[in-house]
Amino acid sequence: MHPFSFVEVESAEAAINALEADGNAVFFAGGTTLIDLMKLDVLTPEVLVDVNRMAFASIQTTADGVSIGANVRNSDLAHDRVIRDRYPVLSEALLSGASAQLRNMASTAGNLLQRTRCLYFRDVNAGCNKRRPGSGCDALTGVNRSHALLGTSDACIATNPSDMCVAMAALEAVIHTQRQDGTTRAIPLADFYLLPGNTPERETVLEKRELITHVQLPNDEIGRRSHYLKVRDRASYEFALASAAVAWELDGGIIKRARVALGGIATVPWRSKEAETVLTGKPAATATYVKAAEAALEGAVPREHNAFKIELAKRTLVEALEELGRN
Ligand code: SF4
């Protein structure tokens, strides 16, 4: 691991200024991804700006919904009573992620910025456009079983690894930030992530010295009837091969409104408006779910080892909807 210095800050302003003072500084919260990648020499920051002493560590109910501080730990968020009651899909997604120890450390903002698990990204000897722009993508012709089917490009097919963000996509979460000049932004999660295109090294719309302060979950009753289903190689401490976050409002067995987001199969947390359109106005029944799953995966582009995930993702979505119907 490369030597680095450690700076503790107590305010958003101090955090942003610390980043400004050193071009190779990064924010440090839980460190559950950052430290791994530093040990592998994938990331070599010279300064870690510890943001753990800042505020932004509470979950607050507001007139607009629920505000989740950037420093709220994944485990605290998952077990929060309001989250469990009003947004069960988020609690379930969080509890399906990583391990209990990691959830105790991982922060909300850190989870939003979680890096891909692509093994070529984590190997400094491999070609990887995301880690070293212009060096190629060894995953295209290599082992790509866990890679993405949706939102890919010829430059990168890495999967977004987060469970939390898939649930937040279905809930239409809004990410709030602060910039160096003191201005703030509210960025809908749907606009927060960038598809890889020709610049896979750029993963979000965040500017260089922009700090996530909190995430807002809208005040929408649809969250109360929601569910997350994750399919993976083993029951714990494993990333999704496919996952589905679903929510709906029913009226006499008819789906009035639906939300669908998919994980484990796309380069960003994948909201499927196509599936939602199929579901809306239809009976809550298996035949409807199957049609929605077909629509959700219509644009999938398989690679040598991951074609099986098309069928797996469809079945995951169908089963998630079946389970939601049984809840
Ligand atoms: Fe790098 Fe993306 Fe290719 Fe993986 S898929 S090697 S992250 S460019």
Image: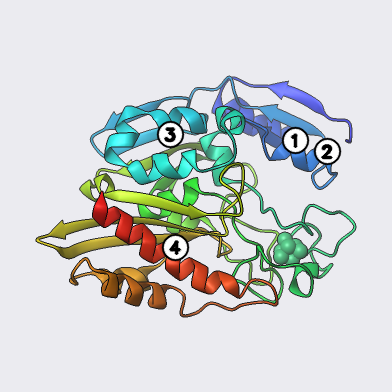
Q: Which mark is in front, 2 or 3?
A: 3
Total count of labels: 4
Amino acid type shown at disc 3: Ala
Q: Position of residue 45 (x, y in %)?
A: 80, 38
Q: CA distance from mark 4 to mark 3?
A: 22 Å
Asked whether the beta carbons under mark 4 and mark 3 sit within 8 Å of each other, the answer is no
Residue 56 in percent (x, y) is at: 47, 27
Identify residue for label 4: 316
Give the number of the mark in front: 4 or 3: 4
Secondary structure at badge 1 equals: helix
> Callout 4, which amino acid?
Thr
**Where residue 316 sits in the image (x, y, percent)?**
44, 62
* Residue at the disc numbered 3: 78
Q: Distance from label 2 to label 4 (Cα)? A: 35 Å
Q: Residue at x 64, y 71 (%)?
A: 306
Q: Residue at x 14, y 63 (%)?
A: 253
Q: SS at mark 3?
A: helix
Q: Which residue is mark 1?
A: 35
